[in-house]
Amino acid sequence: MSGVRYKTWQSFLAGICLGLSTALLVTLQGWTTTFSHGNLQYSSTDRMYYSNSDQFGDTKYHKDDDSVAKKLYENVRVACWILTSPMNLDTKAIHVKNTWAKRCNVVLFMSSVHNESFPTIGLNVTEGRFHLTEKSMQAFEYIYDNHFNDADWFLKADDDTYVIMENLRYFLSAEDSGQPVYFGLRFMPHVTQGYASGGGGYVLSKEALRRFGQLGVKNTSLCSKYGISEDVEIGQCMANLRVSLKSSLDSLNRTRFHSFTPETVISSKFPYWFSRYASDGVKGGLDNISDYAISFHYVEPTQMYALEFFTYHLRPYGVLNLPMAINARSTPDQTYPTGDE
């Protein structure tokens, strides 16, 4: 009976997400570019933190004070690169481009083919799962060569990852980009200090990228380009470069980076293998998700727009959202051993 109730709840939630996404088309036609996915059309909710522009694109509906987010945009510069492919541009990457990626200081879509109109950067690599490590290594090398001075932090995400950039910047505002560190959802096996799950996204400090560009690229014994699992190989590369994987849990030990959809995390219906990988324990349910969550993975296009709506537009009337100081961790400056100490 509980399984039936869960399936019913899941279908209900999916219906809400689809309904809200479709409703946005009817009510918010004038916001930004309209584009297609299958038989549905969507209008992007445009919240960018550029100077001298309509920051929200929907000010006729409601007003918000985004002064703190603007300040963080200026002071915590994040370059985002999204792992994609030619076949995914119109089915996945376009929806990342038209939602959360607009809030990055720099955004780069890494593919195997150069596409000037999208645009994408064509890396010299074969497409396919077994080449993701080489693709990611080349992407970081490209960013080091061309965008090192354009940002303080460098985020890698998939084309089905959804990121709340304001929460990422808030988290990083308490960190030092001059230190050799990186962050993400920590998985346990294969690397002594663990490694950050690729799907939930991970972010390198400027010093971490500098070490990769100056040392890792030139030495394949430090950073191999040919492992099967991209996130494991990046994790081993970081450990070899003495870049520490630091905890991303908030002060209440709740998760910020997530390798699954919100409904999977909320319902705790994780796949069987997850308990063997989750180094901080299997954390599911509303009580274990940070109020300032940063990322979710396996997000379908319709969910991208539902998350945009829930995050930036839905308001409970009469409830004032007060900031919470959750960067002060219960275990200050927690790092994991690289294996070299």
Image (cartoon, grey):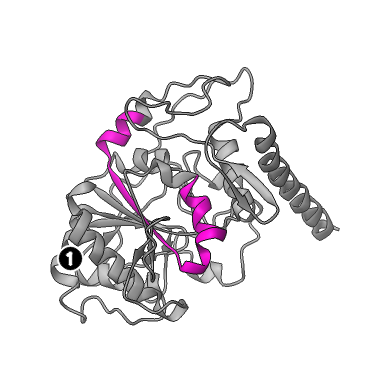
- Residue at image position (72%, 50%) is 14
Q: Residue furthest front?
A: 117
In which image quadrant can residue 2 be found? bottom right
Residue 78 is a magenta residue: yes
In which image quadrant can residue 236 be found? bottom left
Residue 81 is a magenta residue: yes
* Numbered range of the magenta stretch: 70-98
Residue 103 drawn at (x, y percent): 40, 41
- Residue at image position (63%, 25%) is 316
Name the foreground residue: 327 vs 206.
206
Secondary structure at numbered mark 1: helix
Q: Which residue in the protein does label 1 denote?
A: 213
- Residue at image position (53%, 26%) is 58
Residue 192 seen in the figure: no
Circle 1 Cα neighbour tier, 10 Å, few/some/many (<14 / 14–19 / ≥20): some
Query: Does residue 71 sit above or below 286 in this rendering?
Result: above
Query: Does residue 279 sit above or below 252 in this rendering?
Result: below
Residue 189 drawn at (x, y percent): 41, 74
Residue type (three-letter) at the residue carrying disc 1: Gly
Residue 103 seen in the figure: yes
Residue 147 drawn at (x, y percent): 22, 54
Which is the main secondary structure of the residues drawn in magenta? helix
